[in-house]
Image: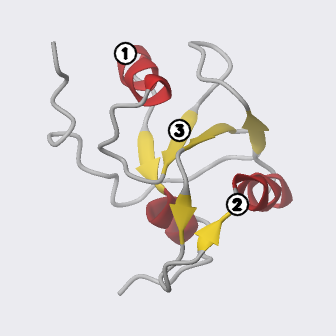
């Protein structure tokens, strides 16, 4: 069974409280097409009071950040199964105020 990922529109406003556990998946790139290393995203998250985690679990992950929010990766499937929000890297950076909205 393929989950309906296209129906999950990104949140328009989302706050990430201190301590939010964030997991990353996929290879991210910036607006110029350059790769954003996962370690850089994890450092950014930690600098904002978030807690990077390596895996998606029901109780130890609050948010999954994926290069493509419609991905069908194992982590993304698990996150959707557990009801954990999935954001794109761009959406995540916008929420943190790193990237301005167009």
Q: Is residue 65 left or right of residue 55?
A: left
What secondary structure is found at the residue carrying circle 1?
helix
Cβ atoms at labels 2 and 3 below 8 Å apart: no
Where's residue 53, x and y in %?
74, 32
Residue drawn at the location 36% of the way across and 47% of the way down = 69
Residue drawn at the location 68% of the way across and 19% of the way down = 60
Q: Residues within 10 Å of mark 1 (few under 14, many from 20)?
A: few
Cβ atoms at labels 1 and 3 below 8 Å apart: no
Label located before the other in sequence (2 or 3): 2
Where's residue 81, x and y in %?
37, 15
Question: Toward the viewer: 10 or 38?
Answer: 38
What secondary structure is found at the residue carrying circle 2?
loop
Q: Which mark is residue 37?
A: 2
Which image quarter holds the N terminus? top left
Distance from disc 1 to disc 3, alpha carbons, whole Å, reads: 12 Å
Give the number of the mark in front: 1 or 2: 2
Label located before the other in sequence (1 or 2): 2
Distance from disc 2 to disc 3, alpha carbons, whole Å, reads: 16 Å
State the image quarter where residue 56 is shown: top right
Q: Is residue 72 left or right of residue 43?
A: left
Q: Which mark is residue 64?
A: 3
Label located before the other in sequence (1 or 3): 3
Q: Residues within 10 Å of mark 3 (few under 14, many from 20)?
A: many
Residue drawn at the location 23% of the way across and 49% of the way down = 9
Distance from disc 1 to disc 2, alpha carbons, whole Å, reads: 27 Å
Residue drawn at the location 41% of the way across and 59% of the way down = 13
Q: Is residue 86 left or right of residue 25?
A: left
Q: Is residue 49 above or below residue 57?
A: below
- The residue that mark 1 highlights is 81
Here the colouring is secondary structure
Q: Is residue 23 above or below residue 89?
A: above
Q: Is residue 9 above or below residue 47?
A: above
């Amino acid at each position: 069974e393929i989950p309906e990922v296209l129906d999950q529109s990104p949140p328009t406003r989302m706050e990430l409280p201190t301590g939010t556990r964030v997991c990353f998946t996929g290879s991210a790139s910036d607006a110029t097409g350059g790769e954003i290393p996962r370690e850089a995203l994890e450092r950014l998250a930690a600098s904002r009071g978030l807690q990077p985690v390596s895996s998606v679990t029901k109780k130890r992950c609050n948010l999954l950040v994926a290069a493509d929010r419609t991905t069908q990766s194992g982590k993304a499937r698990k996150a959707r199964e557990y009801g954990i929000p999935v954001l794109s890297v761009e959406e995540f950076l916008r929420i943190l105020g790193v990237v301005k909205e167009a």
